[in-house]
Image (spheres, rainbow, N blue to C red):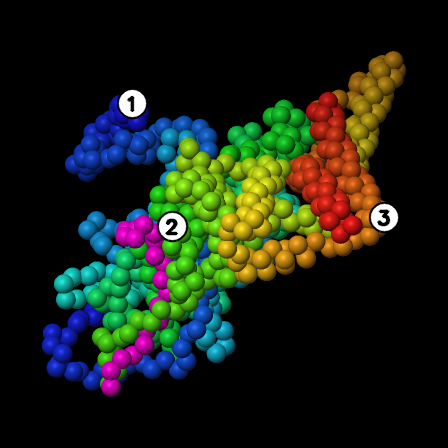
Amino acid sequence: MAGDGKTQAKPMTALLNEDNELAAFDASAVPAQLLPVLDVESSAALRVVRVDPLAILKIVKHARESYPTPVNGQLLGLEIGGVLEVTNAFAVPTQPGSDEDMTQYQVEMIQSLREVNVDSSSVGWYQSTRLGDFLQQPLLDVQASYQASAGAASVVLIHDTAKSEHSGNLSLRAFRLTPTYLDLIRRGSGFTTRDVAAHGLTYANILEEVPVHVAASALGRALVAELQWPAGAGTDADADALQRPSSFNAKLRARAQADDAAGGAGSGDAAGGAARLGSRGLARPMCTGALDLAAGGGGSLARQLEAMGELMDEHAHDASQWMYWKRGEAKVRVQRQQFVQRQALANAAREARGEAPEPVPQDAELDRRFAPLPEPSRLDALLNAANLGLLAKGLTQSRGPALAKMYMAQALHGASAGVSE
Amino acid sequence: MLNLNLPALASSIVKSGATTVATSTTQQCYVHPVVLFSVLDHYLRRNDNQERVIGTLLGVRSDDGRIVEIRSCFAVPHFETEDQVEVDMEHHRSMFALHKRASAREQIVGWYATGNKLSKYAALIQDFYSREAAPFNAVHLIIDTDLTDGNLGIKCLQGSPIGVRAHPENCLFLPLPYEMQYPDAELTALQATADSAESDEGYAVMISDMEQLEKSIDELCAMLERVTAYVHRVCEGKEKPNNLIGKYLMDMLAIVPNIDATQFSTLFQTHLQDILMVAYLTNLTRAQLNIADRLQRII
């Protein structure tokens, strides 16, 4: 970290000298790992998004409570040397209100949070999704405005409640718009086939994914450990657990006891202690639904396939629309060529008769007469393809665990059949 | 600003209209994990020289007010001196109004504070929050952020007026049983947090569903081994049998459904075919998309 501080010191001092007010600012008081923040001109590429459990839980709660309606909210945090730290988040109301109202709400919320020392800079926003079809025009527009105004490091976190619950695995992904896409909108020339091809924009590179890390504070870790190990530490605490007013439900207590009895008995104190320490990794209340043999199939699969069918229909529709435009365009071009040829022939005939040739129409004149059909924007089709791609990929990936669960069910059935015989 | 002063003398009894009598007492409390994380975050971001932080708890109550579910909370700035405490009421009000817009159902149910025991102003603040949470009693949540006993000592309390004539500064805090609530979606988030706490780097990366499944199976195997070892020890007479554990084991075994073998194999085969078909179709779709994309670039 000391090395970092040295390399960053230069631009910072330059910055301080320019501004008298800032000159009084004691730079040595800033911890070394925070120095990159002062260096406003640095443009370290965003490598990773580090999310605090608090922000995740707030997002998860907001998304869960209004499922299946998609919700969104603001992310607060700080970007330090290519790492975007998301430390807090707040929900934005979903009920209809004017844009001014919304802005007012967010400004007030950020001000209120600043009073209690919460990071008050917006680093992006979050959106919940269902079935993964989050890639829509509004999302791109909002994200574009974030990346343009709130700092280039802004991300959008996408959380899928249903997927998290079904797979027992947190579904949280961070996305940003690629420079390719931003470049295309900045030119404002619309999304014609030629532009899209020239920029190399495909359905797969509208958004880029940034890896998400979950990092808890020391107290946060202590809390998780305590939630996993409700009785506190030591065996005698287990006895207390039954009397403690603040305790988990009976099932968890019994499980804790069973584990403790299994781990602690029959061996020396040290071994028992080690077993208990090891048993923390068992994450008792944190057992997610990953092993739920019934989950992941049935209803959600049917809905996903349905959504995929719809997207495919749209994809075909987009393709036929494009073909229609292409045919129309070709027709106009042929008409124009025929006209030019006719003109040339007529002029040749006039010359043969010794008359003065008619003036050949200029390109502009031709353009006016045979206006080329404007190409419909390719963006919708691209987004549609991107959604289809995301959905198909997700479904393919979910088949692996589904297969594993199938064989697990078979083994379980075989074993129970063996027992009953 | 709300200024709450401890009376200089016990005799200086001022008739205050602030005494509220709870219509019904709370009996059970459910806490969502996000609340605890919020409190810890607030504590980490406290001002210099500030020993404890307080804040407002939001949640829902059952109609009769006996069951409280604490769903979220927000921080409230406050300032303590030897004989006086100031709570920023304006901040509290404006934050509540803002929260109300995003989640209309949540009401004020109480307040939280950090520290291993009650602050000496707890009764005064409790009185204030009881009025906010009226007609119900306010719930008080404390978290020992100093880890005095080696743990966070999370406690839920409720105030009860004491004395012949109720005074705001007289309050008896009674323990309130609480349970953590873990909705499935939150569990996944906590699982990720637990992974981060266990990893050497201090953070957890998002893992694929397959990896998550593998981890869960590993955990399951470890649990099975422990339970088997325990059962063996009980059978051999080395361990005192515990009826409760036995009952849970029975329940667990009874869950496995008894399906006819031929029926199961047909089910298995059809399901397997479904899975393979879906995998095939999705892969085909992706291939098609890729081809369409390439063709576009040639045109």
Name the residue tied to disc 3.
Answer: B262
Name the residue tied to disc 1.
Answer: A3
Q: Nearer the viewer, mark 3 or mark 2?
A: 2
Q: Chain of mark 2?
A: A
Q: Is residue A364 above or below residue B278?
A: above
Q: Earlier in the sequence, mark 2 or mark 1?
A: 1
SS class, disc 1:
helix
SS class, disc 3:
helix
From this viewpoint, which residue is outermost toward the front? B237
Q: Which mark is residue A234?
A: 2
Residue shown at 27%/80% (left/top)?
Answer: B162
Residue shown at 27%/57% (left/top)?
Answer: B115
State the extent of the magenta-drawn residues as a range: B146-164
Q: Is residue B126 above or below residue B299?
A: below
Q: Estimate the x, y position of residue B117 in percent, counting from the top left.
A: 26, 61
Q: Are marks 2 and 1 in contact (CB under 8 Å)?
A: no
Residue A20 relative to residue B261: left or right: left
Q: Quadrant location of residue B94?
A: bottom left
Label 1 sits on what residue type? Gly
Label 2 sits on what residue type? Gly
